[in-house]
Image (cartoon, grey):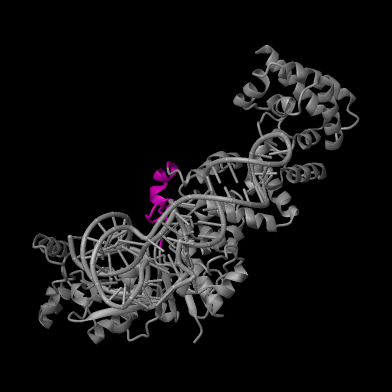
Amino acid sequence: MTVRTRFAPSPTGYMHIGGMRTALFNWLWARRHGGQFILRIDDTDKVRNLDAALQPILHAFRWLGLEWDEGPEIGGPRGPYFQSQRGEFYAAAAARLLASGAAYRDYDTPEQIKADREAAEKEKRPYITVRRSLELSDAQRAACEAEGRPSVVRLLVPRDRKVSVDDHVRGRVEWDCGLIPDPVILRSDGSPLYNFATVVDDVAFEITHVIRAEEHLTNTAVQLLIYEALQAPTPEFAHIPFVAAPGTTRKLSKRELGKYRTNPQFKRMFDVADSVLPRLGLACDDALNPVMVAFYEEVGFLPEAVLNALARLGWSLDDRTEYMSREFLVENFSLDRVVKGAAALDPDKLFAFQEHWMGQRPPEVKVERCLANLVRAGLVAAPVTAESRAFVERLVAALGERIKVFSDIVGYDEYFVADEDLRYDDKAFEKRIMKPERALPLLTSYRQSLQECPSFSAADLETHLRTFIDAQGVGLADIVHAIRVATTGKPAGPGLFDCLELLGRDRTLHRLDLAIARASAA
RNA sequence: GGCCCCAUCGUCUAGCGGCCUAGGACACUGGAUUUUCAGUCCAGGUACAGGGGUUCAAAUCCCCUUGGGGUCACCA
């Protein structure tokens, strides 16, 4: 039997990073066994703009290279793949259960149910359905129908027994059916509930392995009962641990975004969000933040890195393998090596994976993506000229491994702004130019001596500066920092001579003049 | 509260009775290199939640306690 797994997102307009991890495990398991991975859209709630709400999700799958074999946009033999279009299947399945006596129509009002529940709570006994409607005579039932009384369809839970599942990661888990209230499977308007629709669809799609987050473990009891009632074969289950927020054991949730901002382990990501998103004309909002997949793409993470990090969250191959490509994962993924405890997303580790995979990419990719970000930030003019491209190539080369994510490049705006617009890091300016007594005069005579520098190549600049410091009787460190701050405004960056070469003669001299003037005026 | 799940370094994890004076990765700390930062290279610290069993032997098996989490809808 060929392995078939599925992921069933609700069209919400964004793809949660934790959900992506679940989807990844499903995809990996299907690919590992040469089976199919299906995308089904759980749009049982009416959504205003389905396409707009779905696109970000499909985009996230495409970005990570998790192609689906059946589902939206490509269809498949068992469609439709939108639950909103599968109403007839749910109705038919419910009718079968009604006919077989595995389900019953319940005429109790929501108020009655609520009262039952409260009564049970008051008496400190577990609530189970009272089943008044089951006592109704045929005549009474007919009367209810005749007067048009609303009713729901409930599954008749077989009490006095247990249900159990042999879960791939949890082992055997058992529930006492006597404690399970009869679940509603069809609302009074005839629409199906999640637990029911899911099972009907999983049966129809011939899903062999249900791999989902552990918060669904409890649902499994009811779903198992539905499979039985439907007389359908049950798939295998694997309840994987949820992804926790950095440094916590709580489920990563978009609702906690406010808290995450002040979470020290998550800070690094929000710092990136705050510093680069606005420059790219984007806002950190409900759809774009460190909980969402799109964030990592926008900010310039590599899909390989995100995929690798996600795969290592709750799963490992052995005691040493950390870096794994998609292909490698497909060949080696296994459910029995999924851990049971919740795993917290680790921004530091994600950056480490990013650094590794960035190193695997050829420099052209880095140039291309940095260029795109510079254009987006308005630092490089739209149709990129050969000249701009050549400059960025040199900048990126000089920056080397300082570029972690592609958007880091927008933090090096000093190479793109007009000399007059250069912003100085105040602390650095103070420390390197104002404070040291000799800094300003040194800078001034260096600026003069620069006239004699034969060329503005890094090599000539270095030879020249070394000659200069010898003549002045000072050390390299006595002036290097002042020059750097004066010309770039920053305390750190590429090697100084690379910086100056990149800026070129005119800009370097001009910026030196401006900095000297500024320091003298102070 | 009922039901269910979970528990090894700060984090992700290895460990499925002896190879464990607990291994790796990230992070961290110190040193080296460099004009700064990043990087690189060495070095270092840090963990089996607690208590009972079982066993010649327990991080590994069982029980209890504690702690953490999930779930209890005419949501998904």
Quarter assignment of residue A325? bottom right
* Quadrant including the C terminus of chain A: top right
Q: Residue furthest left?
A: A123
Pinpoint residue A148: horizontal percent, then vertical percent: 19, 71
Query: Can residue A309 be seen in this snapshot?
Result: yes
- A288 and A358: which is toward the camera: A358
Pinpoint residue A397: horizontal percent, then vertical percent: 75, 46
| Above or below, comparing residue A507 to residue A280 in the picture | above
How many numbered callouts?
Answer: 0
Magenta-tinted stretch: A242-262
A475 sits to left or right of A131? right
A452 sits to left or right of B27? right
> In the image, is residue A360 part of the stretch drawn in magenta?
no
**Residue at 60% of width from left, 53% of height from top?**
A301
Pinpoint residue A422: horizontal percent, then vertical percent: 68, 27
Quarter assignment of residue B30? top right
- A181 and A43: which is toward the camera: A181
> In the image, is residue A249 part of the stretch drawn in magenta?
yes
Q: Residue furthest top?
A: A521
**Residue at 33% of width from left, 78% of height from top?**
A165
**Residue at 60% of width from left, 67% of height from top?**
A326
- A329 and A258: which is toward the camera: A329
| Above or below, comparing residue A123 to residue A400 in the picture | below
Pinpoint residue A194: horizontal percent, then vertical percent: 34, 69
- A319 and A153: which is toward the camera: A319
Query: Can residue A376 be seen in this snapshot?
Result: no
| Above or below, comparing residue A81 to residue A21 in the picture | below
| Above or below, comparing residue A352 to residue A39 in the picture | above
